[in-house]
Amino acid sequence: MDVHEKFRLAITRRHFFGLGSTGIGSAALASLLNPQLFAGAMDANPKTGGLPGLPHFPPKAKRVIFLHQSGGPAQMDLFDYKPKLAEYRGKDLPGSIRMGQRITGMTSGQTTLPVAPSVFKFQQYGKSGAWLSELLPHTAKVVDDIAIVKTMNTDAINHDPAITFIQSGSQQPGRPSMGAWISYGLGSENQNLPAFVVMVSQASGLNIDQPLFSRLWGPGFLPSKYQGVKFRAGSDPVLYLSDPPGIDKSTRRRMLDGLAKLNGMHEQVYGDPEIETRIEQYEMAFRMQTSVPELVDLSKEPEHVFEMYGPDSRKPGTYAWQCLLARRLAERNVRFVQIYKRGWDQHNDLPRDLTLQCKSVDQPSAALVQDLKQRGLLDDTLVIWGGEFGRTVYCQGKLMDANYGRDHHPRCFTMWMAGGGVKGGQVLGETDDYCYNVVSDPVPIHDLQATLLHCLGVDHKRLTYKFQGRHFRLTDVAGEVVKKLLV
């Protein structure tokens, strides 16, 4: 093959535009197509790697720990005490309460929708006099540190769109997750750990779990370096992080240096920002080979800490272990920690499975708040606890004396928040006597997201990313900061 033939084969259409990316004309074209690719690289905050000018105002929170209870905890069995339901037991849900609102296909075929009062006892706690179920004795101890929001509501009625909505601000897949948005905007204050860490723990009940997809912590249309890094249990918390047998640190360092040079040459030719992301991810992985083993080594934690989080805190992969790890990540200034606890989808056998679920979640969740507080970290760490929706007041299937199930309910559900600019010891909002509709102080999903960003010093309307000709944001075209929740 002569020189001319090689040249003809090399100048493909893609290669032509790639070579052109080093010229002034293509730089102008690229800036028109996506100016933020250039602005982000040139103007990033040199300390954190976040966007210039962020935070927009002094933040109350530096980091977030989101304890997502996947499946939808039953609010009337845990937080939203409704004593009048005992009078309505077994009676059909009145049409004046339902008002023709849609229900899922799992109960739409029932001839009746019998009201099922909670079988659990409630008691008031704290200065706010908040009512809590007997299933939450440890949460009761920190009730003056948390703000209970009884009037969360969402647009989605099934799990996948509902979880996608609360995590990304849209029911449709493809948008960046909350952690990705925050990593993009604020960057990281720890160069040896990811800005966004994700952990998943399995159900404690006996029913089958709903699936969780990695796109829930994905970057969407943001550069892939902003996606969440999943930590697993065991000796290798991050997949493919450890060196294979026969490879030592010096060999790995030489390999990465050579690979960085090759990727750098490729980036100069094609101008693809994902190549730069790949280089950064390799370097982060190299640093994590030291930082992650130290992070997950709990051998130096004192005995009283394990006692605080409960016996499961010594077992890698459990929710209690993950809550303890979340505190350690907060100490190391990891920006966003997401824990998914599966197993809250109790369509049947709710009294049994809810009891098992709370037994594994209540103590570690409360311990995390206590632990952060005693270490002086709660003031600048925002902790959020809750699911993607709630449960119906009516029974799914046959209502029995001591057993019942509940379907999905998006109209009202309960979450709690603590620290990071949130005023503890309060209960926000009221629902009707059937725990079916919001009566006062509704908090839609986009309002929750706007408030979260506000605590971090971010104006949710100004954190945007241009994609396909439109400036997107986490809160889409909605969202108001819930000022009643704030200090």
Image (tube, grey):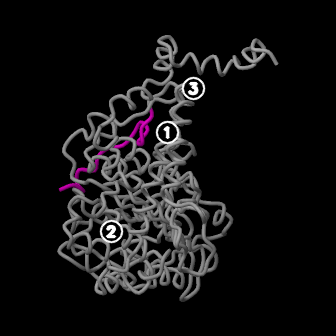
What main secondary structure does the magenta stretch of the protein show?
loop
Position in image of residue 285 (x %, y %): 48, 54
Which residue sits at x=38%, y=77%? 298
Magenta-span inclusion, residue 475: yes
Q: Which mark is residue 327?
A: 2
Report the quarter where the N terminus lies: top right
Which amino acid lies under the numbered mark 2 shown in the image of this protein? Arg
346 over 476 or under it: above or below = below
Q: What residue would you read off at disc 3?
A: 270
Determine which quarter of the picture holds residue 262: top right
**What residue appears at the point 24 percent right and 62 percent down from the top-left corner?**
419
Q: Is residue 1 magenta?
A: no
Q: Residues within 10 Å of mark 3 (few under 14, many from 20)?
A: some
Against 225, residue 142 (above or below) is: below
Q: Earlier in the sequence, mark 1 or mark 2?
A: 1
Q: Is residue 430 above or below residue 318?
A: above
Secondary structure under badge 2?
helix
Query: Label 1 belongs to which residue?
Result: 223
Q: The residue tagged with tag 3: helix, strand or loop?
A: helix
